[in-house]
Image: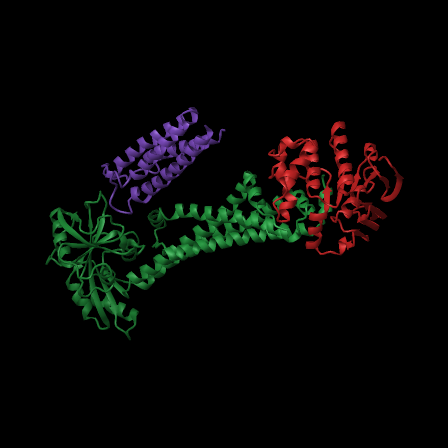
Amino acid sequence: MSMVLRAENLSKQYFRKTGQANCFYAVKDASLALNSGEVTVLMGRSGSGKTTLLHMLSGLLTPTEGKVWLGETDVYGLNDKALSRLRNGKLGVIPQGRSAIDTLTALENILLPAQLAGKGGDIEAAKRWMAALGIEHLSDAMPAELSGGELRRMAIARALAQAPEVILADEPTGDLDDENTERVLTVLRDTAKSDGRAVLIVSHDSEAARYADHVYRMDGGELSPARTTGMN
Amino acid sequence: MKKAIIPAIIILVLALVIAVGSQTFLGACVHEDGSFGACHWAARAILGEGALLAVLAALAMALKKERAGLYLAMAPASLLGMLTPGTLIAICGMDTMRCRMLMRPAMLILFGIALLAALVGWLAARKEK
Amino acid sequence: MGTGKLPIKNLLRKPGRTCALVLLTAFLALAVFGGSVVVRSLRGGLNSLEARLGADIIVVPGEMASKVDLKELFLQGTVGEYYMKASALDKVREVEGVEIAAPQTYLTSLKADCCAVKVQIIGIDPGVDFTVKPWIDRSLSRDLGDMELAVGCKVSTGVGENLRIYDRSCRVVAKLAETGTGFDTAVYCNMDTMKTLLAAAEEKGIVHRLTSDNGDRISAIYVKVAPGYDVSDIEVRLAAHVRKTKTVRTRTMITDVSESLAGIARTVSLLAVAVWALAFVVLLIAFAMMIAERRREFAVLRLLGTSRGGLTGLILTETALCSLAGGLLGVGVASLAVFPFTTLIESRLGLPYLTPSTGTVLALAGTTLLVTLLVGAIASAFAAWRLSRVDPGTTLREGA
């Protein structure tokens, strides 16, 4: 078990356009380590800074202070090209909300990261992940024909098909019913355990905590460890 | 699929413009003395061909089963229209006459587009089956 | 990071959006290409008119409302029947400073073979003519014989066919190159043929006999002033020496035509520029809106590992494909609207109008495509640049 992704005193400051106190911290001084083979769950109310932290960990949002390390690499020390290659190859991000490319079928969407890297993409693996998430029959469907829950699972399958070192999932069970929530969380835990990936799940659903090795809580931009469980 | 109807709608509009235009704004030369030039008879032929094309297009819109065949019939009908002024039926001798300046090029373009639309429609209707 | 076939899929699977952009650029290309072809054709027409009016002064019968009627002839190819006696030619030649004086005689046919159209018949003296003759020489290696005609390019009777004028049959021996002026609808013969035709017209009572008729009539005398003489001086001397005539200076006539042509060219250019500017602004807004609407899509592509450069490349590729399709469509539609109706445009404008050569047209089409590509690239590059300045994380948060 090794440390894969490490956040060091991360802060993100925003400037409000209105009001007197025009400067506030969305995330303040957060430090966190994600280990391979482990599931970490980050809980907290909406607006507490969870998504901001996840975006900073994903290399999508430049922090105001602090650093993010992927292995020995300083993520925000990279130039745009190298950082993009890193996102494509090593980070599987499941963003909140819709993230499908509307002009591609579900299967094409899942294969897109590989194609962006100039590879054909492993169709068998993609179909396997779709089957694991219960959307294997939707390969040729266009995103406009899919329900919210199906789109969510498509985004998860896309992240899994990237075979990344780290999976960063923002509310992966948001639009899902109980059955599919369990299915998704199981798949994420299994990939951590059997493929040795580091998984971070951001959720306000306490159900997710049952699958976690570590649980953190976010409150007003401040990160604190809630507990370390040993469910497995 | 409804898509195979679109060329028929285009052809119907073109055919109506051709039929009405051949007797009015795209028509033959008008002579002061009331006599007819050769182009008058070309315009009459075009009126008939335009009407025929309009009927074929309307039928293609209504009859799904016969659509491909009707499109196939519209192609040579359009070609006939393209050849009518000047080639099959003589028109006036001077380039500055109305039938040469306006009627013939307009008919070539209108029937030409109809011909293309008929071929596209034929392909679409064949796929439909 | 390559985006592969993504741009093509994006275009094909959003047909509405693609069509809108293609139509916009087509509109732009239509204005640029159509406008420049029309302006070029007008300039070409003026140049060829100047070449046909190589004379310095034209002497016409006094009863002719000189300028108006002559312009009619040059632009529309019709002129009334006005004649002066052949002796006027000798009088003109007597004037000092006249280098060449070439007579021309005009007659309008009422019914020629080719439908019921008036054909302007122009009789020339091949020995001295210096304005029409060089033009005929390009199509006919010998002089016109008796009862032989050279016809302008817009007369449909072909070489080798016969044309009946006042019941006299004339043989067409040459078809002349296009000038874009009224000369294109006229037929040309030598003076002997003209005499025969005039006699035939007299029989029919179309042309009145001259009171002291010796058979030679002249409608106009084209005068070339010898080097070293002032054209206005000669004009004054001609007016004094040759009675019952009027003189027209071709320079002023060409200036007249060129002024109205400049006016129309200015209007057309202005219109083209206005459409161009409008289309450019609309394209800028359209691209900005399209990219704003697709911000989330682009942020997702960034999230999946597309670099800034890759994303800009994707946007530019989509734009370039749209612009190319729109440019081709616009040039095609403009071609269909302008080239088949050349004669119609010429007659409506009432100005010489000569379509440029195929090479020039192709060059104009190429330039138009380049312009539309450039406008699309500028419009979308600006929007893409603004997009790339925002962290994808920020975009993903908006309206998730």
Q: Position of residue C204 (x, y in %)?
A: 13, 46
Q: Nearer the viewer, residue A54 or A189?
A: A189
Q: Quadrant of residue C149?
A: bottom left
- Left/right of residue A84 with respect to residue C217 in the rendered view: right
Please say whether residue C153 is visible from this viewpoint.
yes
Quarter of the image with the C terminus of chain C is top right
Q: Nearer the viewer, residue B15 or B120?
A: B120
Identify the colour of chain B in the image.
purple
Please say whether residue C260 is visible from this viewpoint.
no
Q: Which chain is red?
A: A
Q: Quadrant of residue B53?
A: top left
Q: Position of residue A74 (x, y in %)?
A: 78, 55
How many numbered tags mark residues here? 0
Q: Which chain is green?
A: C
Q: Quadrant of residue B22?
A: top left
Q: Position of residue C118 (x, y in %)?
A: 23, 47
Q: Which residue shows up at 77% across the image and 33% down it?
A: A186
Q: Which residue shows up at 58% across the image and 53% down it?
A: C378
Q: Position of residue A61 (x, y in %)?
A: 75, 49
- Left/right of residue A194 with respect to residue C121 in the rendered view: right
| Residue furthest out toward the bottom | C228
Q: Nearer the viewer, residue C107 or C60?
A: C107
Colour mapping? by chain
